[in-house]
Image: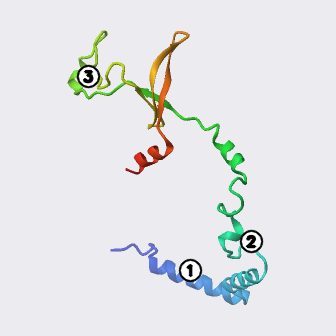
């Protein structure tokens, strides 16, 4: 059995309707009418809240000369860091074989000796090259650069 002091949803809704009716009768002009009048006035005036076509707000990227702003747009991306990876080869191991690896273990890769290494930028193949040593550090001399058209073809497939 419900407690007599407990307020139900119906009691709450009735109290809210009564309060709204009291406020409307006291003000003489309802809040909704005032807001509607303000919106109508804003629609007639040149208001920032008035709906306008996107072409009036945003720059048309296809308009103007092709060189317009292109150097500045390109400069914006020059400082974005990318990760370059040189891949010697790959292999698959079972977890059992992986756990058995120790100091001096040799892991066979699928890349052949003398074969060009893959150069990846953010995981995308962009070139191939050969390993060189410069000042006791490894480097890579690029021997073949993948064309942008070929890279796009690989991304789409």
Q: Which mark is residue 98?
A: 3
Residue identified by numbered label 2: 48
Is residue 97 rendered to the left or right of residue 45? left
Q: How far apart are labels 1 and 3 at the CA level?
A: 69 Å
The secondary structure type at the circle numbered 1 is helix
The secondary structure type at the circle numbered 3 is helix
Tell me the quarter of the image containing the N terminus. bottom left
Q: Residue at x 36, y 74 (%)?
A: 2
Q: From what the image shows, is residue 133 above or below residue 68?
A: above
- The residue sitting at the right extreme is 45
Q: Residue at x 38, y 24 (%)?
A: 88
Is 13 in front, or is 4? 13
Q: Quadrant of residue 9?
A: bottom left
Is residue 49 rendered to the left or right of residue 117? right
**Residue 152 picture location, percent across and down:** 46, 48
Residue identified by numbered label 1: 16
Q: From what the image shows, is residue 92 above or below residue 35?
A: above
């Amino acid at each position: 059995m419900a407690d007599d002091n407990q307020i139900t949803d119906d009691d709450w809704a009735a109290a809210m309707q009564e309060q709204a009716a009291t406020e409307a009768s006291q003000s003489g002009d309802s809040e909704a009418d005032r807001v509607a009048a303000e919106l109508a006035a804003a629609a007639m005036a040149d208001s920032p809240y008035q709906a306008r076509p996107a072409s009036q707000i945003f720059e048309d990227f296809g308009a103007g000369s092709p060189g317009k702003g292109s150097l500045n747009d390109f400069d914006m991306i020059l400082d974005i860091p990318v990760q370059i990876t040189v891949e010697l080869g790959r292999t698959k191991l079972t977890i059992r074989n992986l756990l058995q690896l120790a100091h001096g273990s040799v892991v066979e890769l699928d890349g052949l000796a003398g074969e060009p290494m893959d150069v990846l930028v953010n995981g995308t193949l962009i070139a191939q090259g050969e390993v060189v040593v410069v000042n006791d550090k490894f480097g890579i001399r690029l021997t073949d650069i993948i064309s942008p058209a070929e890279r796009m073809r690989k991304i789409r497939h």
